[in-house]
Amino acid sequence: MLLMPAAPPKDLAAHLHCLDAGVRLGQPKFDDRYQCPVYSWYSMIILPAESANDRLEKRWGQNLEVGFCEMKVVPADASRASLNETFPKLAALAGFVKDKKVPKGWLTFKEGTLRICTGKSKSPKSGAPNGMAFVGAGQHEPENNDGVLFMMEVPAASLHDLFCVAEGLLRSL
């Protein structure tokens, strides 16, 4: 599970770069006897370099244990093209840019269904130990059906496909 508790970078591409770097770093504990990862509350806390400061590093740097809970500061990558320009409505949904027609919100893609939501999300208790990425588990459900702007099945073969569909839907607002 990944968690980016600091202010995200200013561009959607930089945000995705941080998440991608977090996925590539660290590994959950491995059980050599059964040759499989050990199920645990494994967490990777991601701090974008431009948002990281001593206060955040101190808060999220407690209780770290390799293979259980790790924290990494991810440097920026200036070679990334700006996705805010390529997908302006999606960037507005994520709060990276302002758009009078697109409210701030989020999208989810689960079991072939794309949902674009706005408003407040549910805040279920996860039961995870403090300081873990799982404090955000299950918090992408809108409080009620009024928070769902669009919902449709999408045969997305890539993140690009998904973003193109979402951008098209948001342009219809």
Image (tube, helix red, strand yellow):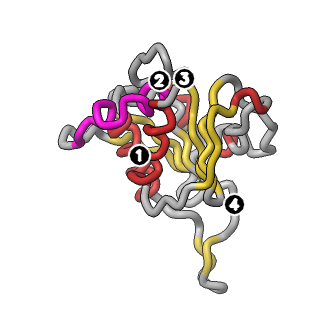
Q: Amino acid at mark 1?
A: Cys
Contact (Cβ within 8 Å) of mark 2 with mark 3: yes
Q: Amino acid at mark 4?
A: Ser
Judge depth for marks 1 and 2 and give the one in front: 1
Real-space Cα separation, disc 3 to disc 4, in angstroms: 33 Å
Of discs 4 and 2, which sits in the foreground?
Answer: 2
Q: Quadrant of residue 107?
A: top right
* C-alpha gap between disc 3 and disc 1: 18 Å
Looking at the picture, how far across and down is residue 141, in whole percent? Answer: 72, 38
Between the residue at mark 4 and the residue at mark 2, the CA separation in whole angstroms equals: 32 Å
Q: Pick whichever of labels 3 and 1 is earlier in the sequence.
A: 3
Q: Is residue 19 above or below residue 124?
A: below
Question: Can the viewer see residue 133 in this picture?
Answer: no
> Sequence-wise, which precedes: disc 2 or disc 3?
2
What are the residue bounds of the magenta stretch? 80-94
Q: How many marks?
A: 4
> For mark 2, what is the residue?
95
SS for callout 2: loop
Residue bearing mark 1: 164
Residue 170 x/y as whole percent: 49, 32
**What residue lies at 41% left-to-right and 24% top-to-bottom?**
96
Relative to 76, is 114 above or below? Answer: below
Q: Secondary structure at mark 3?
A: loop
Which label was assigned to residue 104? 3
Give the left or right position of residue 135, taking residue 108 as reference: right
- Give residue 145's position: percent from left, percent from top: 77, 32
